[in-house]
Amino acid sequence: MLEGTLAEALLPAEALAGPEDGGSGVGPGSDVFGPAGFRRVWMLGVLSLLMAFAAISIDVYLPAMPAMSAALHASVGAVEWTVSAFLIGFSLGQLVWGPVGDRLGRRLPIALGLVFFVLGAISCALAPTIGVLIGGRVIMAFGASSGVVLARAMVRDLHPGPQGARMLSTLIVAMACAPLLGPFMGSAVLDHAGWRAIFWLLAVTGVLTFGLLFTLPETHPPEKRRPVTVSGALRLYGQLLTQRGVMGFGGTGAFYYGGMFAYVAGVPFAYIGFYHVAPAAFGYLFGLGILGVMATNALNARWVEKVGILPILRAGTAIALVAGALTVLTTATGWGGLWGLVLSLLGFMGITGLIVANSIAGALQDHAQEAGAVSALVGALQYGSGILGSGLTGWFADGTPWPMGCVIGLAGLGSFLCLRLLVRPPLPGPRSG
């Protein structure tokens, strides 16, 4: 079933078909992979990898955070700030790469970003102090953000509205393998080669992705590009910030991201430090949330064109509100012990598939010419909120899951209220044809 969904949801056959398939293609070399169906699935794989760079860069080193704290003589809060540092670079980087991608096309800025990513990963692998490690994480994030923001723009180049939401959900299902496998890979590397080897592995991943990038066609041809200056980009961002639809959808996803990254920053210490879960077993508990992400994204990919973006978002944010409240309860009282916490977090994280793709697609749906800039702004809002969520979790860290639980509860409430206060129907609903 997944294979059929990937082949159908990725791209219409005529978008990537070369002349031998009766299509026009979307760029040079679009016929190098043979049958159009294989090219569509290949493009999905590479786009998924680009969009997964944030997850790859964070989740693979989560099991090593306690070991890093001991090796670098750093506090728990300081190590949790390596997540916040990554999000700072990631958030600011998107604001740069989005307009650059609208001006220069998609592939060249992604390639430049991958160079930054590799250099940052190498500096982390060699870091003698926690301060150097944090600086390397910022450089990694600045580079990684190019692939994420411009992969989303490539989706918008080819699919508007609910089709774009379906495409993004399909990509998220595929790319979810990264955070699902990341903690297991990180644990294995940690056990056999130490935490520094994890960053060497990330550097190699960046080099390999650089090569794969040039198997993709350019989806933003020169005739559609627009010159963008720094002042022009700032004016454009200012205009977008005043648009109710962009801010409503973007804010809904941003609040949710605050809770997601509070989870990412806090859960290793909650499970391993507070409940004494073995680092190897941590991957299984973390993987439960990723399976929930994959399941709801698969459902969203099948439903969104029939049901519409807004009804699904309303259901998702309502569930996030309830799950966030349960997380506050379990972390405040210890109700249910480890499994009470696991289940409440699973409820919050598992609903990702109903919120993230739809909030991005909703913000992008009326902005074909500024897809890169809108994608960048939405991404900056999301990861900026992630900075706040992970930063607060680290700032108030007290050795218990309580600070993480509070942030997640507030994030669920904020996402719920933002959607209902700022986003109003009518929206484009199910396709009529």
Image (cartoon, grey):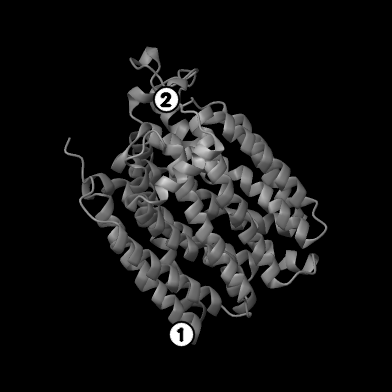
Closer-to-camera residue (393/285)? 393
Within-10-Å neighbours for mark 2: few <14, some 14–19, many 20+: few
Spatial CA distance of label 2 from label 1 is 56 Å
Q: Is residue 370 above or below residue 421?
A: above
Residue 425 percent across, percent down from the top left: 22, 53
Image quarter hosting the C terminus: top left
Residue 359 percent across, percent down from the top left: 37, 52
Q: State the residue at coordinates (59%, 80%).
A: 400
Which image quadrant for residue 411?
A: bottom left
Q: Is residue 75 above or below residue 25?
A: below
Residue 327 percent across, percent down from the top left: 44, 76
Q: State the residue at coordinates (54%, 26%).
A: 215
Give, as a three-letter code, the residue at label 2. Lys
Point out the frontmost of discs 2 and 1: 2
Q: Which mark is residue 33?
A: none
Residue extending furthest toward the bottom: 333
Res. 141 visible in picture: yes
Q: Are marks 2 and 1 in contact (CB under 8 Å)?
A: no
Q: Is residue 46 left or right of residue 430?
A: right
Which image quadrant for residue 20?
A: top left
- Which residue is under mark 1? 335
Closer-to-camera residue (161/339)? 161
Closer-to-camera residue (95/292)? 95
Q: State the residue at coordinates (25%, 56%).
A: 424
Residue 14 percent across, percent down from the top left: 33, 22
Q: Is residue 264 above or below residue 11?
A: below
Q: Which mark is residue 224?
A: 2
